[in-house]
């Protein structure tokens, strides 16, 4: 139940990154007040579990887990929803967590670049600066955007954990439209075609590269949404049939999103060929 609630809160709030109105407009069976009520119920439930029903959500186990997926998505949700909470305490705790973990050889993680991405988004959502959070072994400020996206390739490929790392790398890079340095190992121009190359025959995405996963597909759509109207052409090899294709994000075969006055809708594109 706990993991499900985390995903519900996170998904609702992640939609707000693209467009707050669109996030609610897509679910036509529910009014905005109804969704708000459900969010409040989830927060109240978590407060009771956290043994702080009348206090802040960011306390006790949430603070103890700062810098982990157990806590970060709740903090992200609080920040995106504009809820006043104990955010400064979280920033202090996550700074300590990052500093401690950077003493390890793999720093935040040996394989998962999404550790950098999740923490960066949580820090950013509550007013922190993910480009200066904690200190490394040389006492220099830690830059989660640089280490987790731009220069991740110096240690492990951004795609080491699959398309998930690429998707969240792009979302994180675009969270504040961060500029990539000239010597970056990964940029928008390298990440986008890598994501498109992972698209399955039926248009969806997955971690195993075989069966479509709605969760991963939704993340991919969200990451690519800002580039829907871009005319830039990318060259990549579709992994499902090993054929080279040249296409923009809009021309890529499969499911993509389109913005309308009523919100976001899904439709099938047939122009692109792999």
Image (cartoon, helix red, strand yellow):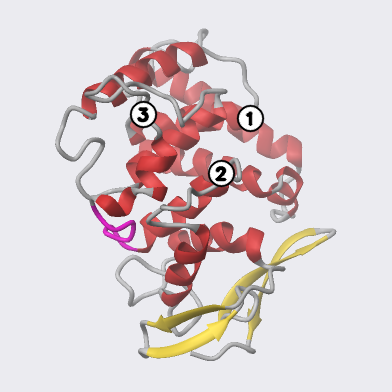
Residue named by callout 1: 81
The residue at 36%/46% (across/down) is 114
On the picture, is 214 further left or further right than 32?
Answer: left
Which circle's residue, 3 or 2, is located before the other in the chain? 3
Element type at mark 3: loop
Q: Earlier in the sequence, mark 1 or mark 3?
A: 1
Q: Give the x, y percent position of residue 17.
A: 63, 44
Main SS of the magenta part reads loop
Which residue lies under the disc numbered 3? 142
The mark closer to the camera, 1 or 3, is: 3
Q: Position of residue 218 (x, y in %)?
A: 52, 60
Please say if 60 is above or below 14.
above
Magenta-tinted stretch: 156-162
Which residue is drawn at the image coordinates 72% and 53% (left, top)?
A: 29
Q: Is residue 193 above or below residue 4?
A: below
Q: From this viewpoint, is residue 248 visible? A: yes
User: Quick one: 224 or 61, which is closer to the camera?
Assistant: 224
Report the front residue among 30 and 81.
Answer: 81
Q: Is residue 1 visible?
A: no
Q: Secondary structure at mark 2?
A: loop
The residue lying furthest to the front in this view is 182
Q: Earlier in the sequence, mark 2 or mark 1?
A: 1
Where's residue 178, x and y in %? 56, 44
Asked whether the residues under the numbered discs 3 and 2 touch, taking CB atoms below 8 Å apart as contact, a structural biologist would say no
Which residue is denoted by mark 2 in the rendering?
Answer: 178
Task: Identify the residue shown where x is 48% and y is 48%.
Answer: 181
Image coordinates of residue 165 in percent, x first then y, are 37, 55
Q: Classify mark 1: helix, strand or loop.
A: loop
Q: Is residue 159 magenta?
A: yes
Spatial distance from mark 3 to mark 2, Cα to Cα? 16 Å
Is residue 219 shown left or right of residue 183? right
């Amino acid at each position: 139940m706990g993991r499900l609630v985390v995903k519900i809160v996170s998904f609702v709030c992640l939609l707000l990154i693209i467009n707050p109105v669109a996030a609610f407009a897509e679910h036509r069976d529910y009014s905005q007040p109804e969704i708000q009520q459900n969010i409040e119920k989830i927060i109240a439930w978590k407060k009771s579990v956290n043994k702080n029903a009348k206090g802040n959500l960011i306390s006790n186990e949430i603070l103890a887990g700062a810098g982990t997926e157990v806590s970060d998505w709740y903090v992200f949700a609080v920040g995106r929803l504009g809820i006043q909470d104990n955010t400064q305490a979280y920033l202090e705790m996550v700074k300590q967590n990052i500093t401690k973990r950077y003493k390890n050889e793999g720093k935040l993680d040996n394989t998962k670049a999404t550790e950098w991405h999740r923490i960066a988004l949580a820090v950013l959502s509550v007013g922190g600066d993910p480009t200066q959070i904690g200190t490394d072994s040389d006492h220099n400020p830690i830059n989660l955007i640089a280490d987790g996206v731009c220069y991740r390739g110096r240690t492990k490929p951004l795609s080491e954990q699959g398309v998930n790392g690429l998707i969240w790398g792009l979302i994180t890079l675009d969270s504040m439209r961060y500029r990539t340095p000239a010597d970056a190992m990964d940029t928008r121009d390298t990440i986008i075609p890598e994501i498109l190359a992972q698209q399955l025959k039926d248009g969806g995405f997955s971690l195993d590269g075989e069966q479509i996963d709605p969760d991963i597909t939704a993340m991919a759509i969200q990451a690519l949404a800002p580039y829907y109207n871009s005319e830039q052409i990318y060259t990549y090899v579709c992994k499902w049939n090993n054929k080279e294709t040249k296409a923009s994000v809009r021309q890529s075969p499969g499911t993509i999103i389109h913005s309308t006055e009523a919100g976001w809708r899904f439709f099938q594109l047939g122009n692109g060929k792999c």
